[in-house]
Amino acid sequence: MTIGMNPPPQPLLDRSSQFRQCLRQRLRLAREIAALRARFATAVHDYERVLRTLQLLAPTVGLSEQDVVHPTDPEWGPAALLTYADGYFLKGEQDRIDRLLHLMP
């Protein structure tokens, strides 16, 4: 077959099998996406809890509550973390943690 030519027509049974296979893959991927979203929601909840704990503990180690800032506007909610949870977010968190460690007495 040369480039640009249409592939030979597949028998109807093969198309039907292929379609069913695609439906199974779609369902499997939908389950994976749902599981990822659930794990992400758990991680965001834990992340928010740790931030609140850091803000409460900051004064006890000589830091102000404002030194422990949220990486995004807290009112944006978990969607902001999903949007900004990339290399920039990770680098920013590493920089903030390093700064806090240097500020500690």
Image: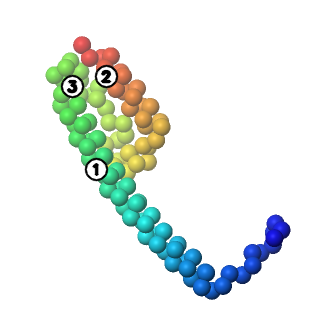
The disc, 3 or 2, on the residue closer to the chain's N-terminal end is 3
Q: Amino acid at mark 1?
A: Thr
**In this figure, which residue is indicated by the disc labeled 2?**
100
Residue 42 circle label: 1
Question: Is 34 placed left or right of 20 in the picture?
Answer: left
Q: Residue at x 48, y 68 (%)?
A: 25
Q: Is residue 90 left or right of residue 47?
A: right
Camera-side mark, 1 or 3 = 1
Residue 92 location (% of width, % of height)? 42, 31
Q: Earlier in the sequence, mark 1 or mark 3?
A: 1
Give the numbered dot on residue 58.
Answer: 3
The answer to whether residue 4 is above or below residue 48 is below
At label 2, counting other C-alpha atoms closer than 10 Å, the crowd grade (few under 14, some 14-19, many 20 or more) is some
What colour scheme was applied to this rendering of the protein? rainbow
Q: Are marks 2 and 1 in contact (CB under 8 Å)?
A: no
Residue toward you, 24 or 100: 24
Q: Which residue is drawn at the image coordinates 28% and 50% (left, top)? A: 42
